[in-house]
Image (cartoon, helix red, strand yellow):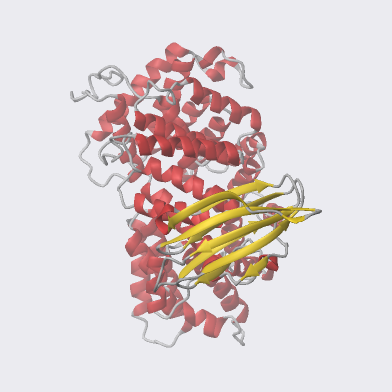
Amino acid sequence: DECLERLWAADEMANSSPDQSWIIRDTVRGIATLMGGVVQVMQRNFVKGGYNICRSWLWLRVLKERALDFEGKERKLLRSLALFALGLLDILLSLLPRSVLKAASFLGGTEGDRDAGLGKLLTCWREGGLFATYGALVWTGYQVDTKTFLNEPTTAQELQILQEVISWSKQTYPDGVFFALLEANFAASQRDVTRSLVIYDRCQQHVTELRGLDWLLNYKRGVYELVRLNFAAAATYFENSIQIYVQVGRRSMVPFMAMYCYLCNRIITNHNLWDSKGDSDPDERGDTVVAQADAKRMLSLVREYKDMDKKNWGYKDRWAFDMLEEYCPDASEEIDAASHPTKTIMAEQSGCPILDMVESMCLRMRCTPWMDESRAERLVELLRTSGTAGDSSPVKIRIKTCGLFAHLELDRQQYEASLQWCKKGLSLARNDDESECQTNDHVNDASYVALLQYIQAFILFRRGELLASQHTASQLEEQLKKEGRLQHYILFKTNILKKELDRSSLQNCTGGNESGDEDNKGYVRTEVTARSQHQENLAVKEGETIKWDWAVQSRDIGFSVAFRPLSSEGEGNPQVISTVHRHAAEDGPLADQFTAKTEGKLLFVWDNSFSYLRSKSIIFRIEPLCREIEVVS
């Protein structure tokens, strides 16, 4: 709130400037509005935040029109500022949903081009102007952190540039903390967490008087210890971060960090990890008796803060309070902090700590991609032995567990295993008589079904199965209309996926199967007029496997596939492989494959002869691509 007040004050000061044509006036107003929108989005005020990000174009467009090619003694300053501000705006706009971007169009702005924005930031750094450092920070932050969040791969060229930026930052800012933090995350993204810890130890000596950065270092150190599955060490660093905030009188984030401490200690107790074999020293793994006492103390702290007279808790602290009710549902007595500083009055503990910690590691900390294969397998085994995926668990717990297994396998890039967990979880949701989730219960949360749908749609898109991905994304949109604790997280990622689907040119694909278009992945769109059929014939060799998938865009259409064998005596009679009388658009795409036992020809027929008035639009793909297909009128 204080940050917003300062930004709006800067905007007001610039607006009151007597020289209305001064380029810096519009620049300050644009940057203040842009950053104000970013802060509002971080506060989960998405409508106002998105609107202000778009509205910033009213002033920032002067940079595009006048500053990029400005001639004069201020050229280097203005060009550096323009490259940074416009690059940042492009990236932010590219991440907003299309519904919000309608405001940008209304205001005469742009929808944003992420690649162009990253290019502007890189140019800003390379030209060495006043804002070169900021350009390098934002560009590196996107490559290291945002791409992890979006599950986007980093190219070899981007990795090389990252190394250049990090080397430059070490020479230019040898004691710089911010670049060091990004370097540590970059090392973690390369699954070198040991190097990340070395970097953090180096930074620690520079932040003892900067309490905010000291808090961040302890928090991130706890995250890195979780990546190593050192739960006792993680709990220690999380508690250090609590003490820093308590010492400066801040209440926000204390319940959140206390809940992390509680979960770590409960995991040590439940899984008897203090004497398990690992790569940490025995004293780092912790004693189960001590861990049990620490768990009670942390849960008591969460209850104490929940009972405080404070209304504007952040969403992370509200999550901690929800978890308190899950683990201590009957804790209705108030705690006298003075008389009982470490006493917790609570009912018998419930819940599954490893399940909730894995959720946080996957979705809040986003650190599971940093695990090497052995640790990732150990974490999967811990979750598996918790029993939450078993038939004895409530259906909603099993759905949640399937979602987290699917996410873990996605982070390991085990796409087929991830899809299997998605199918299992979505099958449970369909078969559950009580699948309508209650929004006041974080276990019965509709967003876990949405998480499964998102992961499924994302993997299908990555595998080039655009029709199936598009259909799953449509179902996901309906699911996201239900309130859920993960709704905003999934909605953001879904909007990015929908933009990628739009960019795939699926709706505008034309031409033959031999076009080899990388954007539409070989899909072909055609119209089947009323009272007619559309047929495609494909010659196949003995032993060859042909795959196909297709969808009708509205209403319904018939479909059949037949194989006509070819011998020395000529063509034989068609053998029906599959047939669908009338397949509806809402039923999604159909996909199948066929392996020919002999040489012959496949006959694909889409039948719209039953429709007297309406044409039907179909999109199909027959693989392998780059094959000549005979189109029959």
Residue displayed at 41% across by 51% down? 476
Instruction: Give the quadrant of the N terminus.
Output: bottom left
Q: Nearer the viewer, residue 446 or 527?
A: 527
Q: Nearer the viewer, residue 469 or 35?
A: 469
Residue 344 in the image: x percent, y percent? 27, 19
Quick one: which residue is furthest to the right in this view? Answer: 568
Residue 198 makes an appearance in the image: yes
In the displayed structure, 101 sits above or below 322; it is below
Q: For residue 71, which quarter of the picture?
A: bottom right
Q: Quick check: 188 above or below 533?
A: above
Whether residue 440 is situated above or below residue 574 in the rendered picture: above
Residue 178 seen anywhere in this rendered image of the structure: no
Residue 355, position in %: x, y?
Answer: 43, 29
Among all residues in the image, which is located at the extreme left? 333
| Residue 568 % position (x, y) | 81, 53
Q: How many marks?
A: 0
Give the left or right position of residue 74, taking residue 491 as reference.
right
User: In the displayed structure, does residue 410 sit left or right of residue 166?
Assistant: left
Question: Residue 100, located in which quarter of the rendered image?
Answer: bottom left
Q: For this view, does 457 lie left or right of residue 334?
A: right
Q: Is residue 630 above or below residue 451?
A: below
Instruction: Report the residue that reaches farthest toward the front.
Output: 569
- Where's residue 539, x and y in %? 72, 58
Q: Is residue 123 left or right of residue 358?
A: right
